[in-house]
Amino acid sequence: MAEHMYDNYAWHDERMISTPIAVNKHKQFATTLYYLDVKDGNTALSNALKGAHANPKVYFSFFDQLGKVLGEVKSPYRVEGLYIQMLKDALAYDQTDKTRRTRYEAELKHIDKNLDGSILPNFNILMANGDTTTLYDVQSPYMLLYFQHPECPTCRQARNQMKDYPFLNQAIADKKIVVLTVYFEKDKKVFDDFLVNEANPNWLNSWNYDNQIEKEELFYLVTIPYMFLVDKDKRVIKKDILINEIEDYVKNLK
């Protein structure tokens, strides 16, 4: 379906931009890409972008509509790898104006890091018992790395939901995985209050006390909570793992 979505489509015709035909087709294409294997998705997306090069106005209308589905942080159909491909294509397109080029370069700089298969950067943390250590010194076959602000309502809701996950709790009990929460802002009192009032005793809870994460822009934490599933070497298995994906991933860990 994705490969043939735009067969005989009039990419050169600007009159198509605001028609229901174009809007519905682009939306259907984006959601179809979401369900594809990334390799297959890349091929179909590459062909569509190449076709859209025929007309700059058509191209950027297509890009913007597709970007709302595949690229926006709050989109349920966000696919970071596909959006990265879109950004790279737009930057290589000679009709991309300076304003768009600057915005796309900034976006690409942030999201083209800590991808699946990469090794996470190390950083310093203060643990609940007062010891200072680093991410790399926390050893476990697997880790769910949970960036948060303790007082964030969404973070609190996610924590409350996760504490009742049977597969996650069993994996923690079996010492197969650790959940490491990381507070990365500057207010130590927020961290101390969290430890007293809300911290899960079955998890490891920490604070990036020297603000290294933000100062060195180690992660693109555009929204919180933001979670990574990593292996013992801190290699990323799943970047930006969603709350409703955790149990499926954990129960299939070897």
Image (cartoon, rainbow, N blue to C red):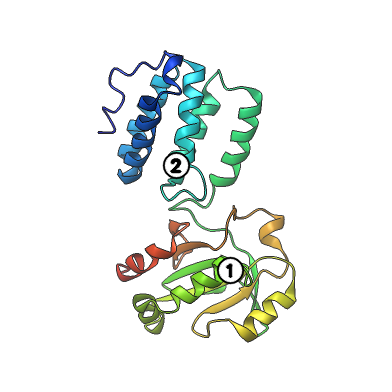
Q: On the picture, is 58 further left or further right than 194?
A: left
Regarding residue 26, the answer to whether it shows in the image is yes
Image coordinates of residue 216 in percent, x first then y, are: 69, 54
At mark 1, the secondary structure is helix
Give amino acid for label 2.
Leu
Q: Which mark is residue 70?
A: 2
Tell me the residue at 65%/31% (across/down).
102
- Based on the displayed image, in which of its 4 quarters is residue 213 positioned? bottom right
- Based on the displayed image, in which of its 4 quarters is residue 48 positioned? top left
Q: On the picture, is 132 further left or further right than 136?
A: right
- Based on the displayed image, in which of its 4 quarters is residue 105 positioned? top right
Q: Earlier in the sequence, mark 1 or mark 2?
A: 2
Give amino acid for label 1.
Pro
Determine the CA span between mark 1 and mark 2: 25 Å
Q: State the residue in front, 5 or 87.
A: 5
Which residue is tagged 1? 153
Q: State the residue in front, 217 or 97.
A: 97
Question: Which mark is nearer the camera, 1 or 2?
Answer: 1
